[in-house]
Image: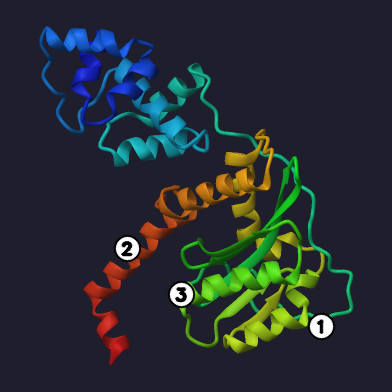
Amino acid sequence: MRYAFIERHREVWPVVVQCRVLEVSASGYRRHRGRGTAPAASPGQRVGDLALLVHVRAIFHEMKGAYGWPRVWRELRDRDIRAGKERVRKMMKADGLRARGKRKFRVTTDSSHGLPVSPNLLDRKFVVAEPNRVWTGDITYVWTDEGWLYLAVVIDLFSRRIVGFSMNERMTRELVIDALRMAWFQRRPAPGLIFHSDRGSQYASGDFQKQLKDFGMKGSMSRRADCWDNAVTETVFGSLKVERLHGMRFPTRRQAKDETMDWMRFYNHKRLHSTLGYVSPMTFEANRKVERKESGEEERHAA
């Protein structure tokens, strides 16, 4: 029965992956295949419990434990596999497949300084109608056996896409400047973009503020000790740590960097984002371009 299932789903999942999930040998499958094959299942049909479990397990492990049942169900639907929400929820619960839980993290912001502070231009208006109008930035940390690794990111609020980042063993103004420069060189936004951050000394530094001015950007900062003013970036960091880094040990900073960059690629390209209607940030941007082209907005902007 299991060999027949593998044969029917050769075009969906690699044979080696299916054999590992179903706990059968690849050599046994090859012997079975030599005796004849079963007809392929039609796309989009409702699958049996064994077939569905293979798909669920494969998606769960492909996403490295980041998805709970709602996102797994949506991923199944996107792959044209029919299954009810409750069926997926119960199956994952019975199989012990649970998304990583939440945990608390220490604060990295040092706002006890005498540097100038920008007004809060964002004022928690996290929904933005166009790309490259409002970016947010923040710093987080990853522990390794070699010491701390600090990560600074720049996020476009329109699509929640990570458009710039920098990593270093020290939490300096160069860390956030490098992330901003990466974002600017990738996106080349028009003057007037709002860059929102917390009141940390790195963002309040004269060098960072000069860089904003050189790029034609307007600085905006959260109120003192109010993490909700930069909630989007805090949420991205929470997802990184809960979905990927929690429980992992990194002997070197290099290994931590590689794992972090792998998650950021996953986040931008594949992770289903609830705020975006359960598509990835890059898919959301691509859909917006199609909408603009179909409505003729691009031609009007060009004119």
Q: Which residue is mark 1?
A: 116
Please tell me whether mark 2 sits on a helix, a strand or a loop: helix
Please tell me whether mark 3 sits on a helix, a strand or a loop: helix
Quadrant of the rendering where the C terminus is positioned = bottom left
Instruction: Report if the CB atoms under discs 1 and 3 are less than 8 Å apart.
Output: no
Quadrant of the rendering where the N terminus is positioned = top left
**Foreground: 189 or 144?**
144
Query: Could you tell me how far apart the alpha carbons at marks 1 and 2 are, in whole angstroms?
Result: 40 Å
Please tell me whether mark 1 sits on a helix, a strand or a loop: loop
Q: Position of residue 273 (x, y in %)?
A: 47, 51
Q: Is residue 174 above or below residue 116?
A: above
Q: Please state which of the two labelled residues, at mark 1 or mark 2, is closer to the viewer.
A: 1
Q: Position of residue 204 (x, y in %)?
A: 77, 77
Which of the marked residues, 1 or 3, is nearer the chain's N terminus? 1
> From where the camera sits, is residue 32 visible?
yes
Q: Which residue is mark 2?
A: 287
Decide if residue 39 is on the left or right side of residue 142. Answer: left
Query: Could you tell me how far apart the alpha carbons at marks 2 and 3 are, in whole angstroms?
Result: 17 Å
Q: Residue at x 25, y 37 (%)?
A: 80
Picture quarter containing residue 220?
Answer: bottom right
Q: Is residue 207 above or below residue 253?
A: below
Q: Position of residue 131 (x, y in %)?
A: 45, 73
Q: Amino acid at mark 1?
A: Pro
**Foreground: 169 or 199?**
169
Which of the marked residues, 1 or 2, is nearer the chain's N terminus? 1
Q: Amino acid at mark 2?
A: Asn
Q: Amino acid at mark 3?
A: Arg
Q: Residues within 10 Å of mark 2 (few under 14, many from 20)?
A: few
Q: Position of residue 6 (x, y in %)?
A: 25, 18
Decide if residue 204 is on the left or right side of residue 277. Answer: right
Q: Which residue is mark 3?
A: 187
